[in-house]
């Protein structure tokens, strides 16, 4: 799997992720990254920009590395590892855009969320674009891929989690009580939360819109609610 970008590579190096080889542009200027790659005895190939552009077709910032495909975490292992009174999980209901996914991962990791759950089918996977957009934060938060979201929600409820969905119609997100184990569901771009999943939610919250546009980008909406959860818990 080819991934790219300076921040992504830095975090891969910091997390001791195995890097098979690195491809660097002839005018790459970040000497610290090059020195670290050399100290780790990672094979480095120098290349011109055109060749690198053909390889990943993205803004690679002059560095591409080859790593193993992303390894998803086992949900049961993640749940067993959480040791706090009010766990906080994030469920993405068939999100499609890799940039949204990467941005959500970055926000979730920054906020200290315990894990992210995505469905196996009709959902964006962890790709090079997702890894770059997450700015390396993907290395520090477990991401679980499950076969069936409905069954997963039942499992979470059995373990004491309350399921909160973010939707166009619901309680003002600022009035919701978040001082409990929760799994927050963010829906897909355009479609939102699917009908079946919405019916399984214990609470529905909404972000009031005061402008002409009646919805927010999925990653922005996730960020708003995530930090409301954190701030309301911090106040005790």
Image (cartoon, rainbow, N blue to C red):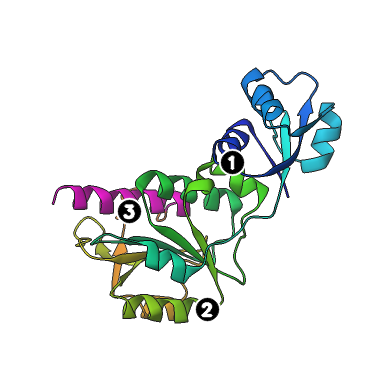
Q: Is residue 228 magenta?
A: yes
Q: Earlier in the sequence, mark 3 or mark 1?
A: 1
Query: Is 184 or 157 nearer to us in this picture?
Result: 157
Overall secondary structure of the magenta section: helix
Judged left or right of residue 95, residue 23 is right
Residue sitting at 81 percent across and 28 percent down? 49
Q: Label 2, label 1: how many angstroms apart (C-alpha)?
A: 32 Å
Q: State yes or no: discs 3 and 1 in contact (Cβ < 8 Å).
A: no
Residue 70 in the image, given as x and y percentages of width and height: 63, 55
- Magenta region: which residues? 216-236
Q: Earlier in the sequence, mark 3 or mark 2?
A: 2
- Furthest residue toward left: 236
Residue underneath mark 3: 225
Task: For residue 32, say whether it is visible.
Answer: yes
Residue 64 in the image, given as x and y percentages of width and height: 73, 36
Judged left or right of residue 91, residue 121 is right
Label 1, residues with CA under 10 Å away: few <14, some 14-19, many ≥20: few
Label 3, residues with CA under 10 Å away: few <14, some 14-19, many ≥20: some
Residue 143 in the image, given as x and y percentages of width and height: 51, 59
Residue sitting at 80 percent across and 35 percent down? 53
Q: What is the number of the mark on residue 148?
A: 2
Residue underneath mark 1: 16
User: 201 above or below 22?
Assistant: below
Query: Is 143 or 228 nearer to us in this picture?
Result: 143
Label 2, residues with CA under 10 Å away: few <14, some 14-19, many ≥20: few
Query: Is 218 or 154 nearer to us in this picture?
Result: 154
Q: Earlier in the sequence, mark 2 or mark 1?
A: 1
Q: Is residue 108 magenta?
A: no
């Amino acid at each position: 799997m080819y991934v790219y970008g300076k921040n992504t590579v830095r975090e891969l190096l910091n997390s001791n992720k195995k890097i098979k080889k690195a491809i660097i542009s002839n005018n790459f200027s970040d000497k610290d990254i090059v020195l670290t790659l050399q100290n780790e005895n990672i094979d480095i190939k120098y290349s011109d920009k055109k060749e690198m552009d053909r390889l990943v077709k993205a803004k690679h910032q002059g560095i591409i590395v080859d790593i193993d495909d992303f390894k998803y975490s086992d949900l049961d292992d993640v749940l067993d590892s959480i040791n706090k009174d009010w766990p906080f999980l994030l469920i993405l209901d068939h999100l499609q855009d890799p940039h949204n996914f990467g941005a959500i991962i970055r926000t979730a990791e920054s906020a200290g969320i315990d894990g992210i759950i995505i469905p196996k089918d009709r959902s964006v996977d962890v790709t090079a674009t997702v890894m770059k957009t997450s700015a390396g934060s993907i290395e520090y938060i477990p991401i679980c891929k499950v076969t069936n979201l409905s069954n997963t929600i039942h499992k979470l409820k059995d373990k004491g989690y309350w399921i909160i969905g973010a939707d166009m119609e619901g309680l003002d997100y600022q009035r919701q009580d978040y001082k409990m184990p929760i799994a927050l569901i963010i829906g897909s771009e355009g479609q939102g939360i699917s009908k079946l999943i919405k019916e399984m939610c214990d609470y529905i919250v909404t972000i009031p819109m005061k402008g002409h546009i009646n919805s927010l980008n999925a990653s922005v909406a996730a960020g708003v609610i995530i930090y409301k959860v954190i701030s309301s818990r911090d106040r005790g």
